[in-house]
Amino acid sequence: MADSRSANADAQTLSPSTRRKTRKVRIGKLWVGGGEPIRVQSMCTTDTRDVAATVTQIQEVEKVGCEIIRVAVPDMEAAQALGAIKKQIQIPLVADIHFDYRLALESIRQGVDKVRINPGNIGDRRRTEEVVRAAQSAGIPIRIGVNAGSLKILKEWDQWPDWDQEAWAEQMIREAQEQIEILNAFDFQDIVVSLKADDIDRVVLAYTKFSQRHDYPLHLGLTEAGTLVPGTIKSAVALSRLLSQGIGDTIRVSLTEDPVQQVKVAFEILKTLGLRAYGPEIIACPTCGRCEVDLFEIVREFENRLQKDPTLFQKAQGKKIAIMGCVVNGPGEAKDADFGIAGGKGVGAFIKKGKVSGNVPQAQWVDSLIQQIQETETLAPTSFSC
Ligand code: SF4
């Protein structure tokens, strides 16, 4: 069962038939790939050695629906903190390992649900083999996380290659395949692959080509998307090009922002593409000279109250709720909404299914929308395996 604190406790895949078929891999209590809902994950920004701070941040992202959380493991103290972190969280925990394979071994001993290794810097084959054996006996998957900027081949050259996007994509795939072969030599198939870069075309090409050759589940993302607004747009453009082709089994939006925002943006991308349900669709106008209320503040308050109340957020799931700035265009623009309010000075028109059903004093707009949600029939729980 989903954690009841999770904002998207009943989030589901809406159009599975268009998804590309991949293998199914278990990560803790969750499955990824094989037609499962596209999982939303994030990564902590805390120092993993600070167990209390890391647990607090994970609990925050759990509240907004994050399904898998990754933490950096820069040293042995961080690896040794993972067991204590795992005991206090609900969602699968992933250890992110660079450079030192012994950190992966300790993370597995601590009970993590997956390890991510970067083939560009984990070292020679023997080290990868040790990690594979440990993961195999613990029954956990490995993500082969290739980043364009840390390809193995770049370390051997003293100048940046003059490659076209095709060559970059092929090299990223080649290095992922080298690791896959090592894992396969141990009959290890619980593999998730990522092929990240900060260039949209490179990312799209690498994932598209890889998906034509392999059926391992894919973790989609850009390496560094940027700050909230440009990063959201860049991520939405890149991920939608892949997701709309049916490519991708789990996503992470790498914003220079609080992981809570990363999770919300990821779900909004999936919701906009019709791939996951996540709360209501709020239709709000941009306002103009006809607006006589502080609509921005009203919308913000409404969103905040929804976010703070997972039960309410869940009840509102799938609803179109309009908050419009005037009664000149508002009711018409909101005609597709299930319900909403169109503002006037001091009083707003409450609209249900395109028809005005009464007037509401401005101070009660948010309350009246919340009350309407509460009177809504609760959606039946859907399958959600965590
Ligand atoms: S709904 Fe009214 S206030 Fe909002 S943008 Fe349209 S005309 Fe302007």
Image: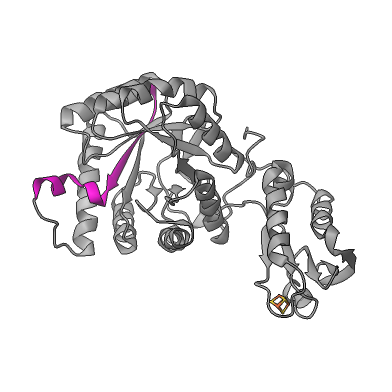
Using residue 176 as the reference point, say whether residue 377 is left or right of it: right
Specify the quadrant of the image occupied by residue 339: bottom right
Q: Position of residue 119 (x, y in %)?
A: 23, 39
Q: On the rendering, which quadrant does ligand 1 occupy? A: bottom right
Q: Position of residue 293 (x, y in %)?
A: 76, 69
Image quarter (top left, top right, bottom left or bottom right) of the C terminus: top right
Query: What's the image's color scheme?
Result: one colour
Q: Is residue 99 magenta?
A: no
Q: Who's the residue at 40% across and 56% down the image?
A: 226
The answer to whether residue 186 is left or right of residue 248 is left
Q: Position of residue 277 (x, y in %)?
A: 61, 52
- Front residue of this view, candidates 104 and 16: 104
Q: Let me know if residue 296 appears in the view.
A: yes
The N terminus, quarter of image: top right
Q: Is 139 part of what is drawn in magenta?
A: yes
Q: Tell me which segment is drawn in magenta.
A: 138-157
Q: How many marks?
A: 0
Picture residue at 82% right of the left edge, 73% below the top: 344
* Residue 318 makes an appearance in the image: no
Q: Nearer the viewer, residue 188 or 140?
A: 140
Residue 48, position in %: x, y?
41, 30
Indicate whether 189 appears above or below 65: above
Query: Left or right: 261 with respect to 219?
Result: right
In the rendered view, would you say 296 is above or below 374?
below
**Between residues 208 and 153, which one lies in front from this camera angle?**
153
Q: Is residue 117 above or below residue 259?
A: above
For residue 349, which quarter of the picture? Answer: bottom right
